[in-house]
């Protein structure tokens, strides 16, 4: 009786710990303008790349025609610099009339007609980071209503020109305001990125109640150093961050910069693998009109996306930092599967890293089938105690998808024979 009661309490506690808008049960995927296109508003000099309705429509077209949408990349998200410099006479936010002549409602309609979703940007404060009109506390309900009326599907609420007190009041109030519109609008909070301190002075259990995702740390830049600083920060604070993530509420290490200028091919593969084990949102921020075939292949890797979108939504962790500057990351997945990322921080040459699943604390004495996520190679019959060697390129990764084969493999009797008495210990798992 006592046990039943406490399980019940646990279940209630869990239920109350999630934003109840039903959205983003797996990490969101889409395209976000900021990292690649910033606040480029000069449509006279640079009509192809300026922040305008044309840019978002073209990216939406690419998402559909180049196979992104079918893989789950469905959000088309506007960032800063879409607004006119002033609100209108009714105090309503308005888009820049020259760059968004058709208005946001028309853009949302267009995006929806393609089966995609539209995201927009605001800032809880007097101004956005680039100096456009902010959302002050008394404008929260009005702006939420405006976004809903336009048919917007997601809001990123930044925190420039604000204060701690302001944010503590404003971020939860926007949750209520979005809910009150009656439209399902996913909510990305930049709040923690503005809360300092080490470890960060953030109430993550509150965040899981009010936001679908949140930016924890600095803006990503188009460089490998930026990736490393984000990975290190997330790993250093993983005891706090990792438990906060789950279906409907995600840590956001910021956009994918793959396809731009700062990463080599190895580094591009590393960002994709690391973001995937971190159960990170996958927001492309690159020019989809001219992306290279090799970048597209990395971003469209089906097994990678399946791992990122695993329904359990468990964020992975860095489990090892070797003296050899090899790091190992692990993400548990549904159906007793898992993903391992072997990441080289070395700068010399490909490194042969030898280990075993037992050394990585895989405790079940079972047999795994392994698929290399990038090469597609399959290793069958890997036992927990078997030593294996992976060859990891400098600033690169080897990524493995592992699943136990004990009750699935056609050669069941063969395995059964190998394992004899062990077999009884295995629990069947659903697939
Ligand atoms: C608003 O919140 C309630 C729970 O408090 C939830 O049932 C409802 O679906 C939410 N509505 C929207 C539009 O998110
Ligand atoms: C964090 O937020 C939760 C949920 O809103 C609340 O119950 C708790 O008291 C907060 N913790 C702190 C330390 O403020
Ligand atoms: C394996 O587990 C032991 C004991 O809990 C722990 O000390 C060690 O760090 C773990 N190793 C890995 C790679 O997780
Ligand atoms: C794996 O390698 C370790 C030493 O690195 C060795 O002690 C162990 O016997 C090896 N295991 C197997 C199954 O070969």
Image (cartoon, rainbow, N blue to C red):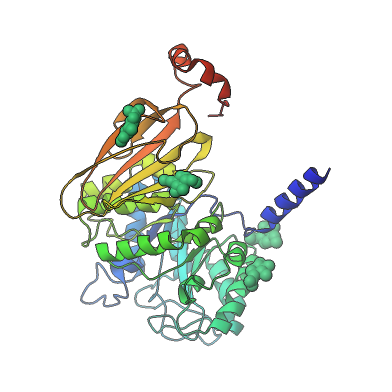
Which of the 4 quarters of the picture holds residue 427? top right
Of 238 and 117, the residue lying toward us: 238
Q: Position of residue 176 (x, y in %)?
A: 65, 70
Of 88 and 295, the residue lying toward us: 295
On screen, residue 144 versus residue 253, left or right, reads right
Residue 156 visible, this orientation = yes
Indicate the quadrant of ligand 4 in the picture. Answer: top left
Q: Position of residue 132 (x, y in %)?
A: 42, 83
Outermost right residue: 1
Residue beneath the point at 62% across and 60% down: 19
Q: Is residue 163 above or below residue 325?
A: below
Of 312 and 105, the residue lying toward us: 312
Residue 308 visible, this orientation = no
Which of the 4 quarters of the picture holds residue 138? bottom right
Q: Position of residue 1 (x, y in %)?
A: 84, 42
Q: Position of residue 282 (x, y in %)?
A: 40, 54
Which of the 4 quarters of the picture holds residue 425? top right
The total of numbered circles placed on residues is 0
Of 242 and 265, the residue lying toward us: 242
Q: Is residue 167 above or below residue 31?
A: below
Q: Is residue 59 above or below residue 320?
A: below
């Amino acid at each position: 009786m006592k046990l039943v009661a406490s399980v019940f309490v646990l279940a209630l506690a869990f239920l109350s710990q999630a934003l109840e808008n039903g959205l983003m049960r797996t990490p969101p995927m889409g395209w976000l303008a900021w990292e690649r296109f910033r606040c480029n508003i000069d449509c006279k000099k640079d009509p192809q790349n300026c922040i305008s309705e044309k840019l978002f429509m073209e990216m939406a077209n690419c998402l559909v025609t180049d196979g992104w949408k079918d893989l789950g990349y469905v959000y088309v998200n506007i960032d800063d610099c879409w607004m006119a410099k002033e609100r209108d006479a009714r105090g309503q936010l308005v888009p820049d009339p020259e760059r968004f002549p058709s208005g946001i409602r028309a853009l949302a309609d267009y995006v929806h007609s393609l089966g995609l979703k539209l995201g927009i940007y605001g800032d809880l404060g007097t101004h956005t980071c680039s100096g456009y009109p902010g959302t002050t506390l008394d404008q929260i309900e009005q702006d939420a209503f405006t976004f809903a009326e336009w048919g917007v599907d997601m809001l990123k609420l930044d925190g420039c020109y604000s204060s701690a007190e302001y944010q503590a009041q404003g971020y939860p109030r926007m949750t209520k305001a979005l809910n009150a519109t009656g439209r399902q609008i996913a909510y990305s909070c930049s709040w923690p990125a503005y809360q300092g301190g080490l470890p960060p002075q953030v109430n993550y259990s509150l965040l899981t109640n009010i936001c679908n995702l949140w930016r924890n740390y600095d803006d990503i830049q188009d460089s490998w150093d930026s990736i490393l600083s984000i990975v290190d920060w997330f790993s250093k604070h993983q005891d706090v961050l990792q438990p906060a993530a789950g279906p409907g509420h995600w840590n956001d290490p910021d956009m994918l910069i793959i396809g731009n200028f700062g990463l080599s091919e190895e580094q591009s593969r590393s960002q994709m693998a690391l973001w995937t084990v971190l159960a990170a949102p996958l927001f492309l921020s690159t020019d989809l009109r001219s992306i290279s075939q090799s970048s597209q292949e990395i971003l469209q890797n089906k097994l990678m996306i399946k791992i990122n979108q695993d329904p359990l939504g468990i964020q992975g962790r860095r489990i090892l930092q070797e003296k050899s500057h090899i790091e190992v990351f692990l993400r548990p997945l549904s159906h007793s599967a898992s993903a391992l990322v072997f990441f080289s921080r070395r700068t010399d040459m490909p490194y042969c890293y030898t280990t075993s699943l037992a050394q990585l604390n895989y405790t079940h004495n079972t047999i795994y089938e392994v698929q290399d996520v990038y090469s597609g190679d399959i290793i069958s019959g890997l036992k927990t105690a078997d030593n294996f060697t992976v060859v990891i390129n400098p600033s690169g990764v080897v990524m493995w998808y592992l699943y136990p084969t004990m009750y699935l493999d056609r050669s069941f009797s063969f395995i059964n024979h190998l394992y004899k008495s062990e077999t009884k210990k295995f629990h069947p798992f659903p697939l």
